[in-house]
Image (cartoon, grey):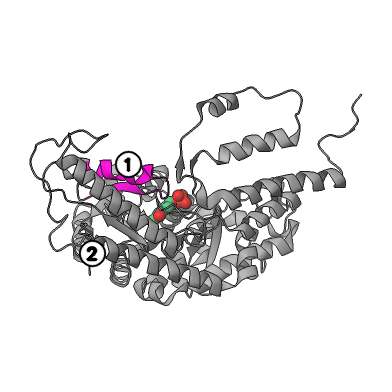
């Protein structure tokens, strides 16, 4: 006695009603976003309720949307202006619409002739990214789920191009500041852990080119085959920039593949400052970038660009009988021939719609604004007496307070908890050179000057209160943190001469 014969196919009136209900949820969320706690405590009741078996019969959409809305308000608000932890992903509204359209239209873009124009949209987007770095016509690229998968395909491409099938003597070079996804990708690509060389860094935390040359020579002398150097265009810890021009030169001389992990920094190529900073990146054999970071897209969009597209294809293409009806690549690439993936979402629309709607100028201005804001944070913290060892190359500032006595690492861990407890901003921490550092990363399109000034005020106040409490643990009222532990003083600059000017 079902009123609807095919419940999986709602009619036009129903789809409109459903769509409007979902839009209303988003509207409410975005309206409240600036005032949501930067890290909301989780609701155990809600979580427990979500651990349930699949229902045999459906329930009304409004109740389900209430669950989604409640779920969205738990944890970190990574779409919001106070999210200064990790490398934020803002989530452009236009990109969300593109995702909705892509899923509703459900076009198959992995092989071009099933949806030529949609595949062309994606090819065009990849070309725009290649144009950013002056790549030749023969360059090819893929949109991935993120930077990790892009690094994976890059390593497999370099391996195939330079080592062939017997590759266990191949050695690759990173630093201790390189994102862990590169090491993970190398392991997934079949390399033994011992084939990963950690090149020492300079005080600026950039790879030391002379040390790289020395390690390559030592590995050759040991009968190994150096084949890949991975430079970072913006490390996750501090935004440090490896000396790309020098690394490109060494890779050329030594016959190595030069991959640049620009997952964080890549889109800053749109700005004059970014271009100057990343000079040399155009010489890379391959580049990873993450539009879901500095192009503010929702999570799920990374990209790999390979200068010699034929090499990307050689590493990823296998013939399959059941695809024999499909056209060979012509002007539009068959993306599956360049990627580990076959069926997947129509990712290109997520980038195409916002860029066409807003224009590149809007992105350029937003990125310039974030560079300025990082500078504001840096200068304010220096002025307040914090130790801020590295000037921001991109939009990340690592800092700490060096207390007169006690364990500096423990003090800063307490400081971070207190800053985040205020609820207006969410910062994170890292360890650099063995020392605990707090980091601010400004990269949400919704973060502007007002929130940055608030962040600085929150940091200053939290630090002052903590210092007062630790000086007079008894008299200063309700003290949450314990009294100062006596112990060796571990302060002083993180590394000698580390003020990376
Ligand atoms: C974020 C990041 C990655 C990993 O990218 P995902 O999109 O999280 O998979 C790799 N390298 C750098 C430098 C990053 O900042």
* Residue at (18, 40) in percent of width and height: 470
Residue extending furthest toward the left: 488
Residue 37 or 233: which is nearer the viewer? 37
Horizontally, residue 391 falls left or right of residue 314, namely: left
Where 487 sits versus 467, above or below? above
Near-viewer residue (172 or 169): 172
Q: Nearer the viewer, residue 256 or 388?
A: 388
Q: Secondary structure at mark 1?
A: helix
Q: Earlier in the sequence, mark 1 or mark 2?
A: 2
Residue 114 in sight: yes
Pointer 1 residue? 417
Q: Position of residue 236 (x, y in %)?
A: 35, 55
- Give the numbered dot on residue 488: none
Q: Which residues are magenta?
A: 411-432
State the SS at label 2. helix
Q: Residue visible at 62% across and 57% down?
A: 93
Image coords of residue 427 (percent x, y): 37, 49
Q: Position of residue 500 (x, y in %)?
A: 22, 66
Residue 383 - label = 2
On the question of residue 343 being in view, the answer is: no
Q: Would you identify the image quadrant in which residue 351 lies?
A: bottom right
Q: Quote the CA–CA distance across marks 1 and 2.
A: 22 Å
- The location of residue 384, given as percent across then percent down, is 23, 60
- Report the front residue among 150 and 434: 434
In the figure, 468 relative to 355: above or below?
Answer: above
């Amino acid at each position: 006695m079902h009123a609807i014969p095919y419940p999986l196919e709602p009619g036009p009136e129903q789809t409109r009603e459903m769509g409007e209900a979902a839009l209303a949820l988003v509207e409410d969320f975005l309206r409240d976003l600036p005032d949501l706690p930067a890290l909301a405590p989780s609701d155990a009741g809600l979580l427990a309720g979500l651990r349930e078996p699949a229902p045999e019969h459906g329930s009304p959409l409004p109740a389900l949307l209430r669950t989604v809305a409640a779920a969205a308000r738990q944890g970190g608000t990574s779409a919001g202006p106070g999210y200064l932890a990790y490398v934020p992903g803002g989530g452009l509204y236009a990109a969300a619409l593109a995702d909705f359209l892509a899923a509703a239209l459900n076009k198959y873009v992995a092989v071009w002739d099933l949806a030529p124009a949609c595949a062309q949209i994606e090819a065009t987007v990849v070309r725009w990214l290649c144009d950013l770095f002056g790549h030749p016509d023969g360059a090819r690229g893929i949109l991935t789920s993120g930077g990790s998968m892009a690094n994976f395909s890059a390593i497999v491409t370099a391996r195939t191009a330079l080592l062939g099938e017997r590759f266990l003597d191949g050695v690759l070079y990173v630093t201790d500041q390189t994102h862990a996804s590169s090491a993970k990708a190398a392991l997934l690509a079949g390399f033994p852990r011992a084939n990963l060389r950690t090149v020492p860094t300079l005080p600026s935390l950039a790879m030391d080119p002379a040390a790289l040359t020395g390690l390559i020579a030592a590995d050759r002398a040991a009968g190994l085959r150096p084949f890949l150097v991975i430079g970072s265009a913006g490390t996750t810890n501090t935004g440090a920039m490896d000396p790309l021009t020098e690394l490109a030169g060494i890779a050329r001389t030594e016959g190595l593949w030069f991959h640049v992990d620009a997952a964080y920094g890549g889109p800053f190529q749109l700005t004059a400052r970014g271009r100057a900073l990343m000079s040399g990146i155009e010489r890379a054999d391959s580049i990873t970038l993450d539009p879901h970071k500095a192009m503010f897209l929702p999570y799920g969009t990374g990209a790999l660009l390979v200068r010699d597209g034929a090499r990307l294809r050689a590493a990823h293409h296998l013939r399959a009988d059941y695809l024999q009806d499909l056209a060979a690549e012509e002007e539009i690439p068959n993306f599956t021939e360049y990627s580990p993936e076959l069926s997947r979402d129509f990712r290109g629309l997520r980038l195409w719609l916002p860029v066409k709607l807003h224009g590149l100028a809007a992105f350029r201005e937003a990125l310039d604004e974030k560079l300025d804001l990082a500078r504001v944070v840096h200068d304010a913290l220096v002025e307040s007496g914090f130790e801020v060892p590295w000037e921001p190359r991109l939009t990340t500032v690592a800092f700490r307070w060096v207390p007169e006595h006690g364990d500096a690492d423990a003090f800063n861990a307490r400081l971070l908890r207190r800053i985040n407890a205020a609820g207006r901003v969410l910062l994170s921490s890292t360890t650099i050179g063995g020392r605990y550092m707090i980091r601010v990363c400004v990269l949400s399109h919704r973060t502007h000057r007002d929130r940055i000034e608030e962040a600085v005020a929150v940091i200053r106040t939290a630090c002052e209160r903590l210092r007062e409490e630790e000086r007079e643990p008894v008299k200063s009222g309700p003290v949450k943190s314990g009294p100062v532990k006596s112990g060796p003083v571990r302060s002083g600059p993180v590394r000698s001469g580390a003020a990376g000017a």
